[in-house]
Image (tube, rainbow, N blue to C red):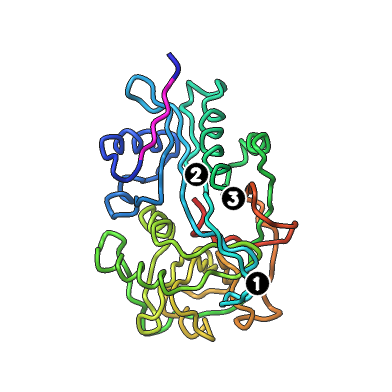
Amino acid sequence: MSPEIVEIGWQDVAWHAVFFRHVSEEFDGIDFAGWAEAGGWTARYTVFALVEGGAIVSTVGVSRMQLVVGAQAGDASPARIVRPALQLGAVATRADRRGKGLAARLMCRVLALADADDLPVLLFANSTVTGFYPRFGFRPVKPSRVWVREVLLPAVERGAGLDPMCAADRLRIEALCARSLPHRGALSAMPDPAILLWYLCNDVGRALSVDGGRSVIVVSEHKRILRVHDWVGQLPPNPLAHLGAVIHDRVERIEFGFLPPPAWFAARLQTVPDEDAFMFCRGVPLAGESLVFPAFLRT
């Protein structure tokens, strides 16, 4: 008997543990269970799963988001286009069932729903499956990475750390996301606290409140490099006035997971192709522009 397709939403708790077990086996170290416990699984996220004998053999996760096209200024520019879109993730087939068309069957189901509502679709793949997605009308897009050389020293006054498992801290992040403008660039998206929470629950970065609580910065440090993964809330005119509050050691380079405002570093900002980001788009109105799709809006 062919596996049946089951749609698993936030309210379908009987299936949650089965899904968590499936993704933990296919993606080593990834924690969906903690994210769901923290309230990250909302009505905007649905898993399409092929189920056989009560076990999941293949999945495609679908996040509904607001895509922003042409957000060059990071402000209320009328040139921006905001439209509903889908982003796919958790595309995973059990090792013993690969090569049997299961992922293709799920992809056809998801894309039929997208086409019915005229929704653009995007996803980030891994290097082993880049030949799979063009079969379904996706085209590869090469995002860029941005960085600047800057020496920073830790400040005496520290930013207040936020805990994704603390309800009050989550509410603060959600409120700031709601007031945030999208990051600039040829392709961006409206801030999504659920996706940001996923990264925090998986220890990808530390969230700290700065600037009197007017913004939250998510960062990590490695070998004198500060990675500013996201900055939600009010973007200050001078980021350096706040970054010293979020670092532990001397920094000599700052990398951004988004395209920062032009006034921050002007001509000193360096842009290079992101060789580790295998991005695919379908129905997204791009004309080959270089882009920096926000790192913490990728599923």
Question: Three-letter amino acid code at disc 2?
Answer: Gly
- Mark 3 or mark 1, which has the lower sequence index? 1
Question: Alpha carbon of mark 2 to alpha carbon of mark 1: how far?
Answer: 29 Å
2 or 1: mark nearer the eye: 1
Whole-percent x, y for residue 294 in the image: 55, 62
Question: Three-letter amino acid code at disc 1?
Answer: Ala
- Residue 120's disc is 3
- Magenta span includes 152: no
Q: Residue at x 52, y 49 (%)?
A: 87
In the figure, 204 relative to 118: above or below? below
- Mark 2 or mark 1, which has the lower sequence index? 1
Question: Alpha carbon of mark 3 to alpha carbon of mark 2: how far?
Answer: 15 Å
In the figure, 271 relative to 210: above or below? above
Residue corresponding to mark 2: 89
Q: Residue at x 54, y 34 (%)?
A: 107
Q: Quadrant of residue 291?
A: bottom right
Whole-percent x, y for residue 271 in the image: 69, 66
Q: Residue at x 46, y 49 (%)?
A: 63
Do callouts 3 and 2 mark residues in contact (Cβ within 8 Å)? no
Q: Observer-nearest residue: 221 or 82?
A: 82
In the figure, 256 relative to 54: above or below? below
Label 3 element class: loop
- The residues colored magenta run 3-8
**Residue 122 appears in the rendering:** no
Magenta span: predominant SS is strand
- Residue 61's disc is none
Label 1 element class: loop
- Residue 79's disc is 1
**Residue 180 appears in the rendering:** yes
